Amino acid sequence: MKTKNLILFTLISSFFLIFLVSIWKILATLQGLNIQHLNLQIIFIFGLLISFANLRIGSKIKIFYKSIIFSLIFVICDGYIIQKLPLWYNIGIFLILYFFVNKINKYSFENLKEEHSTQVIFFDFLTLFGILFFSFVILFPFYMMLITSFKTQISLLVNPLDFSINFGQDLKDLFKSYFVIFKTYKFGKYIVTSTIVSVGTVIITLIFAIPAAYAIARLNFFGKSFMSTSILIIYMFPAIVLVIPLYTIFSQLGLRNSIEGLLIVYTATTLPVAIYMLQGYFKSIPKELEEAAILDKLSWFGIISKIIIPLSIPAISSVALYVFMIAWNEFLFSLMFLDNPNSFTLSRAIQYLSGDAETPRQYLMAGSVIVTLPVLFIFVYFEKYLVSGLTAGSVKG
Amino acid sequence: MKDTLANTEKKTAYILTLPAVALVFAIILFPIFANVWISFKEVELKDIRIPEPRAKKIVKSISEDPSKIKILYKLRNSSLLQEIRDVSFQDKFPKNFEIEELDPRCEFKKYALKCKFGNWPPKYRENFQVIFKKNDGSKIDKKELKSTKPKLVGTSDNVLLNTNFTLKNFKKVLFDNEFVDLLLTTFYYTFFGTVGSIIFGILTAQMVNQKFYGRTFMRSVLLFPYVAPVVALAYTWELLLDPNSGTLNSLLINYQVIETPINLLGQKYIQINFFGFDFKLRLALTTVIMFEIWRYFPLAFLFILARLQAIPKELYEAADVDGASPFQKFFNITLPQITAVISILFMIRFIWNFNKFEDVFLLTGGASGTRTLPINVYQQGFAISDIGMGSAVSIVIVVLLLLFMFFYFKLLGKRVDEN
């Protein structure tokens, strides 16, 4: 048996245990528990002991009993002797320990003798650590956004660490921020504007992009190759260099503060990628179908509407979803072009809200939840389509 | 016959592509050229509004004589800087109205008052008053009078269209003391944001490429920061990092990691003691870069994962037979297979991070050492309201961007040649 491997194994597994327990302790602190010490050293020592004892015992005891015994010992020491903490916290700790012991159970003294065993262990734990770490880091801000929108100004200032929500209270009080932003700040109107702008952009983009993409994919004409290569280069030009000329031109034409102005700009900025994505898909449709249609004397309009569009619904949906997402999330142009609250989009309205230092943060977060939810919902529901859109359109972002 | 067929094909193609090409040209290509034009001009935000002759109509009854009515037009030139030439005025009145005194500049025909006011200098104001009476002696309906609005027309110069050019903007941008600092900040932001997001992308892709319970869910979650709106995310982060009652600072103080809160977004430098060496870290910039990485690593993840899943399994099986360690497998099989994707990603992200405006704007507004070039475009153009300067900064961005693209395609060309 290699002592080096044994030491590394116990060290890595105890660091992993520290990480698990710390996340749980942080979440528990945020539920209002008064935990002032993470007690990292104690968890570390426990981790070392448990992983060593686990190796020692091996398969002499059934894994089920083994996990329960280890977990109970840890819970009793951590939750009752060192800190007095409520039952739900200790149940959580128990489950974490149960999970942990099950994870380390697959290693035995024989395992550690194998070649590269430290690296295998390292990679195994790194993956586990990564899954937990990234889930926590990514989901935490979203969790905070949601929780803050249900809190009141006073409770946020008194104890910023208390994330617990009192579900016993009246629904009206619970959703107070939402009522306020809809009533006082007219968020209903902004939702309508945002929806009109995003859906409008999708429709106009598709109307412009489908014929153009068809022409690039199928027809021969002078300047075709130039057009298809320049599409992406045009797409790389950022919005920030367009802003000043567009602002001046739109001001003089009276297109600022209008939905039409936004629609034009959003359509133009999403067109290149829409054409790029669609023409790629159109090229994969067998040509024979169209040749038959040409013999039937169908016009190009007939070919596009009767053959191309029905066959490329998946590609069109992913373009549509991608364009919708871009238009819904867009901020820069709405900041520049809209300064009249009557024509705000959701993003611009939230930014406007934050400009006033007096605005309570729970209103800001309620607005953020409202603008985020539709996008996340669409994303989760249509993930397959959107991911292909994201990959193709990823030159932008 | 064949020739005509080819011709119809061409014609159809032009008809089909024209709307899209025209729109892209008008909204994307034209502004880029317009930027060049504006950047050589001394234009401020207030100049771009075309001067308008304006009139406010006030209807007043005359107490001594109910059959007469006084109408006051408050005339003014909306511009404080430019004159308006040949202002003409027109207002319509209901039938049966007669005018009492006619201003020499005006005429009253067919119940319409028409005037020629000539040239109005900047800031011009005049109270123009007309008295009317009804010729049939009936009661005057004030509402009817108020409902019509006067029309004013005048011609004026458009600052944007004249041909006065100057190099002042570029001199100011390029020889400004802070220009080097601006470039450096932009470079740090771009470079570290790009490298960070690619490293996290590799880690997460490697992770999700293994089999575990909840893998598809994990893949969706990893993309959340990329698909959610910037506004919501930036304000959430601002709350999270707030020095007074932000969650992060409160947690760190609660666990006695720090004693006083750190203003992560508002402090330019922080002293760090690293193995006895004191050095200054650009704190706000680092935080902004962290946000950048957090928001854009999902994209790198998506690309690299797609590439990882395309690597043939046989390569790993062969390596297992040879007794390769996990590290060896990673460095000798995985990494060479994904270098192409990484180089493409690096360039794309580099260009886009270089142009990123919203993230920094929403988090810090460009304060405490986070002013990048795109932020400077906004600040010059809209905060200082010097459109010409803003355009000049945009031109600097476009030139640097073209340079990046040039090198990128050169490198890419080389790569293709080698293979």
Image (tube, rainbow, N blue to C red):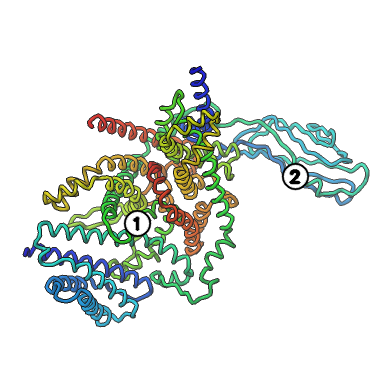
The reply to whether discs 1 and 2 touch (Cβ–Cβ < 8 Å) is no
Identify the residue at image location x=13%, y=59%.
Answer: A117
Give the image location of residue A273, x and y in percent: 44, 39
Q: CA distance from mark 1 to mark 2?
A: 67 Å
Mark with earlier residue (1, 2): 2
Q: Is residue A331 visible?
A: no
Direction from residue A17 to residue A175 in the image, left or right: right
Say which chain tag 2 marks.
B
Residue type beneath disc 1? Thr
Vertical arrangement, residue A356 with respect to residue A218, above or below: below
> Which image quadrant is residue B398 in?
top left
Instruction: Say which residue label 1 marks.
Output: B216
Instruction: Identify the mark at residue B102; answer none if there is no mark.
Output: none
Residue type beneath disc 2? Lys
Q: Looking at this view, is B387 or A347 the one in front?
A: A347
Give the image location of residue A210, x and y in percent: 50, 37
Instruction: Identify the mark at residue B57; answer none if there is no mark.
Output: 2
Q: Quadrant of the N terminus of chain A?
A: bottom left
Neighbor class of circle 1 (other Cα within 10 Å; few <14, some 14-19, many 20+) is few
Vertical arrangement, residue A281 with respect to residue A139, above or below: above
Identify the residue at image location x=60%, y=51%.
Answer: A342
